[in-house]
Image (cartoon, rainbow, N blue to C red):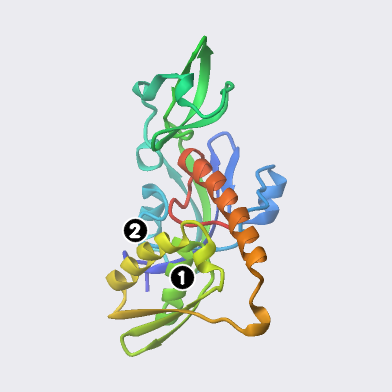
Amino acid sequence: MPIEKGDIVRIAYTAKLEDGTVIDTTDEKTAKEFGIYNEDYRYGDVYVIVGEGNVVKGFEEDLIGKDVGYKGSVKVPPEKAFGEYDPEKKEVISIARLKEKPRVGDRVRVGDRVGVVERIIGRRAIVDFNHPLAGKTIIFDYEIKEKVEDVAKKVEAIFMIYTGMEVKARVEGKKAIVEVPRNFHFIPYAPLNKVSALARIFKYLDIEEVEIVERHRKSEVPSFEEVKKEGEEKEGEAKTEKAEEDLKAEIVPEEVKG
């Protein structure tokens, strides 16, 4: 059956600009080849709920009507990718509003926005709040690997999309039991993103109740110091990734690529 809105599919892709510059990929080898490898990312196929905006609009539209196994490309214009470039989104910001003294090219957060420092004039900085790919046409080379049919697997896929974490799920009637990793609640944003996952489960699946389970075995429980250290490390990573996601190419906007 052709892919429709509401389907959950597993895909692989590489995104590039019209000049051939690779900006994102699910393939680790390709990332290393083109110098965009990030050791904090989890490379491999990704899941998408078609119609939920997990990928840019033009890419998502091209998925509809295709069959599993399809391999092809789609050229997505700016208006269906990251928007047209808007010169009005440049602002002059007092350096005093920034946590650290900026340099040209730095990414800075101002309130809930992230931009790039374009120029520094005295105690003021010109910050460009456009998405870095605004005005760009993006080409996606992709393959549709699977349409997820099993309900439990759909639950697992939805959790992966919105929390970036692997979970184990089973379904009993209209109830889903989801076993999350023991460090789930120590990962910044994971508990909050869980709400987004639950909303999609109730929206797309015939599920009335979701039970979240943490399973701990005595031999596996880490010390308090180990847990605290891991939480601090993950928090630092999450803050860095959050700033990058707000500004850099977010080809799969709500998916956490590990």
Q: Quadrant of the C terminus?
A: bottom right
Q: Amino acid at mark 1?
A: Ala
At 60% from the left and 54% from the top, the residue drawn is 232
Image: 202 above or below 77: below
At 57% from the left and 33% from the top, the residue drawn is 19
- Farthest residue in the top direction? 122
Residue 214 at x, y percent in the picture? 50, 78
- Farthest residue in the bottom direction? 173
- Do we see residue 38 in this rendering? yes
* Residues packed near mark 2 inside 10 Å, few (<14), some (14 to 19) or many (20 plus): some
Residue 195 at x, y percent in the picture? 36, 64
- Which is more N-terminal, label 2 or label 1? 2
Foreground pick, 222 / 143 = 222
Mark 1 and mark 2: Cα distance apart in space: 14 Å
Residue linked to disc 2: 52
Foreground pick, 139 / 188 = 188
Residue 249 at x, y percent in the picture? 50, 42
Residue linked to disc 1: 157
Q: Amino acid at mark 2?
A: Glu
- Do we see residue 150 in this rendering? no
Q: CB atoms at circles 1 and 2 under 8 Å apart?
A: no
Foreground pick, 184 / 162 = 184
Disc number at residue 112? none
At 44% from the left and 50% from the top, the residue drawn is 253
Check disc 1 and report its element: helix, strand or loop: helix
Say which quarter of the image contains residue 61. Answer: bottom left
Foreground pick, 81 / 231 = 231
Image: 73 above or below 167: above
